[in-house]
Image: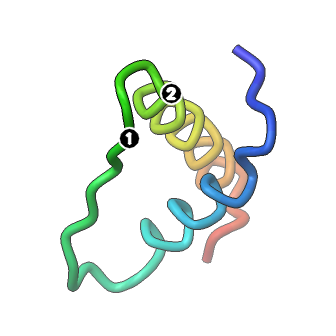
Amino acid sequence: MKFFNREKEINKILSIIEGEPNLIYFIYGSLNSGKFNLTEETQFIYSIVVTDGLFS
């Protein structure tokens, strides 16, 4: 699935993942708003970034 205009959300989630774990975050939205697909896409991007060593 191709995402449109979700770069801001994906970057925010990636920055949260990289930060110090001191809060609990929720992804919420209306039914069929793409929450699951957003997390799947973020997980995919994160796995590429970590595998390529872009996060140190």
Tell me which corner region of the image, top left, top right, bottom left or bottom right, holds residue 3: top right
Is label 1 in contact with label 2 (beta carbons under 8 Å)?
yes
Mark 1 or 2, which is nearer the eye?
A: 1
- For the image, the number of numbered tags is 2
Q: Secondary structure at mark 1?
A: loop
Vertical placement of 3 versus 54: above or below? above
Left or right: residue 11 versus residue 33 is right
Q: State the quadrant of the C terminus.
A: bottom right
Label 1 crowding class (10 Å Cα cut-off): few <14, some 14-19, many 20+?
Answer: few
Q: In the depicted view, which residue is nearer to us: 48 or 23?
A: 23
Left or right: residue 34 versus residue 4 is left
As drawn, which residue projects farthest toward the front?
30
At which x and y percent is residue 51?
Answer: 63, 47
Label 2 crowding class (10 Å Cα cut-off): few <14, some 14-19, many 20+?
Answer: few
Query: What residue appears at the point 71 percent right and 45 percent down from the top-left corner?
Result: 6
Which residue is tagged 1? Answer: 29
Vertical placement of 32 versus 9: above or below? above
Vertical placement of 9 versus 43: above or below? below
Q: Amino acid at mark 2?
A: Gly
Q: Secondary structure at mark 2?
A: loop
Query: What residue appears at the point 35 percent right and 23 percent down from the top-left corner?
Result: 31
At which x and y percent is residue 23?
Answer: 21, 79
At which x and y percent is residue 25?
Answer: 27, 64
Query: What residue appears at the point 72 percent right and 65 percent down from the top-left corner?
Result: 54
Which residue is tagged 2? Answer: 34
Q: Amino acid at mark 1?
A: Gly
Q: Spatial distance from mark 1 to mark 2, Cα to Cα?
A: 8 Å
Left or right: residue 17 versus residue 21 is right
Tell me which corner region of the image, top left, top right, bottom left or bottom right, holds residue 44: top right
At which x and y percent is residue 52?
Answer: 72, 51
Going from the N terminus, do you reach mark 1 or mark 2 first? 1
Q: State the quadrant of the N terminus.
A: top right
